[in-house]
Image (spheres, rainbow, N blue to C red):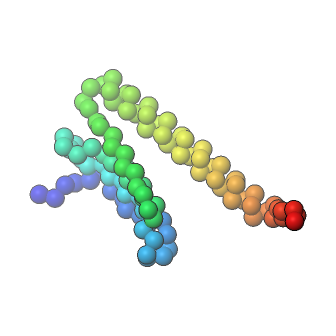
């Protein structure tokens, strides 16, 4: 029987088909044997994050706190990256005038 997913997403990050940067995320419905995963790969390396889900309330609270922290850091990082991109578009290019 095919697993049922609460969430499943696979996205390639580059437009070029030969560059395999990607994100794969999945959460299966009520699976005891498959932890929710988030896999991020660039053209060379990848990381795979697994999040064990237990039925204990304290452990669920801790996991939720970790997920919220993770999301906050990613959102803050994305905001800083966008600001850096915008600054490079608007600021004049620095020229090294040392000979």
* Residue sitting farthest toward the front: 99
Q: Residue 2 sits in which quadrant? A: bottom left
Q: Can residue 31 be seen in this view?
A: yes
Query: Observer-nearest residue: 30 or 18?
Result: 18
The residue at 32%/27% (across/down) is 59
Q: Report the side of 37 relative to 94 (left or right).
A: left
> Based on the displayed image, in which of its 4 quarters is residue 86 positioned?
bottom right
State the image coordinates of residue 24 (x, y, percent, origin top left): 37, 57
In this rendering, the count of numbered labels is 0
Q: Does the image show residue 7?
A: no
Q: Position of residue 56 (x, y in %)?
A: 27, 26
Residue 63 vs 82, above or below: the answer is: above
Outermost residue on the top side: it is 58
Residue appearing at x 65%, y 55% in the figure: 82
Extreme residue in the bottom direction: 17
Which image quarter: residue 4? bottom left
Which residue is drawn at the image coordinates 84% and 62% (left, top)? 96
Whether residue 1 sits left or right of residue 8 in the image: it is left
Pinpoint residue 46: horizontal percent, then vertical percent. 40, 55
47 vs 70, nearest the viewer:
47
Q: Farthest residue in the left direction? A: 1
Q: Which of 98 and 67 is in front in this view?
A: 98
């Amino acid at each position: 029987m095919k697993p049922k997913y609460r969430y499943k997403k696979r996205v390639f990050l580059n437009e070029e088909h030969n560059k395999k940067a990607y994100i794969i995320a999945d959460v299966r419905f009520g699976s005891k044997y498959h932890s929710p995963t988030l896999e991020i790969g660039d053209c060379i390396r990848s990381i795979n994050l697994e999040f064990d889900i237990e039925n204990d309330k304290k452990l669920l609270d801790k996991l939720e706190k970790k997920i919220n922290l993770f999301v906050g850091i990613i959102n803050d990082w994305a905001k800083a990256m966008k600001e850096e991109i915008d600054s490079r578009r608007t600021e004049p290019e620095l020229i090294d005038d040392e000979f």
